[in-house]
Amino acid sequence: MRRHGWIVLAMVAAGALVGCGPRTPGESRMMGQVEYPAAFASARDVFAQYFSVASADLDAGVIRSLPRKIDAPNDRLLGGSPARQVATLRLRRDGGNVVAQVCVETHRQGSAVYRQMATRDENYDSVPHESPAQIDAATTPEQNETWRTASRDRALEIKILNDVYRALHPGEK
């Protein structure tokens, strides 16, 4: 009997965890009972005040930005790498309400640092040991760039969400 209790408990715990996937990053806010197309149009207009819009898909409810260069403090003792922000705004229906979620990521360029730190073996014979692609000759500098996510700008996420809410509810604060 005791064994059955543990099995039932394990099944209940497993059932509770089903569907618990990783949470998407970003701040979210309930926009209230508004029409979805109107909410998407307002969100796109507000988003365009902060970022250049790369794509806006009404059906998927996703608005993505083009990368925007920013001035960020140095990330190393002797200098820093270029920084940029990339934003994504998602809208979804939740019952009769619309929920908006914004994620503003700060990226740091990392390829130049890693390329400078990497040491290449000296080649003293006439046989090449690296192809042109391995030494960046077959690609453009833009293709060789690597960006890593350094942080999120939560204050800007909240500001964008508040502006979207105010655009949908002009009489409220």
Image (cartoon, helix red, strand yellow):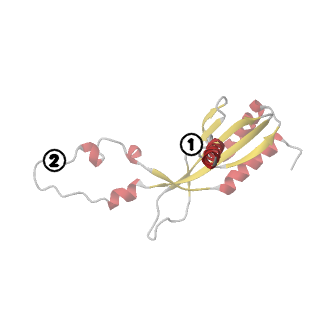
Closer to us: 100 or 49:
100
Q: Residue 50: horizontal and vertical position, in percent? A: 66, 47
Q: Which residue is mark 1?
A: 66
Residue pictured at 48% horizontal, 53% vertical: 148
Residue at the spot 69% in from the left edge and 44% down from the top edge: 101
Relative to 134, is 155 above or below? below
The vertical placement of 95 against 27, above or below, is above
Residue at the extreme front: 1
Categorize mark 2 by other alpha carbons within 10 Å: few (<14), some (14-19), many (20+): few
Density class for disc 1 (Cα within 10 Å; few <14, some 14-19, many ≥20) is some
Image position, residue 17 (x, y; %): 63, 44
Please tell me in which quadrant of the rendered image residue 30 appears.
top right
Q: Which mark is residue 128?
A: 2
Q: Secondary structure at mark 1?
A: loop
Which residue sits furthest bottom? 77
Q: Which mark is residue 43?
A: none
Which residue appears at 68% of the width and 43% of the height? Answer: 47
Are the residues tagged 2 and 1 within 8 Å (C-beta)?
Answer: no
In the image, what residue type sits under mark 1?
Leu
**Percent x, y of residue 76:** 46, 67
Q: Residue furthest right?
A: 171
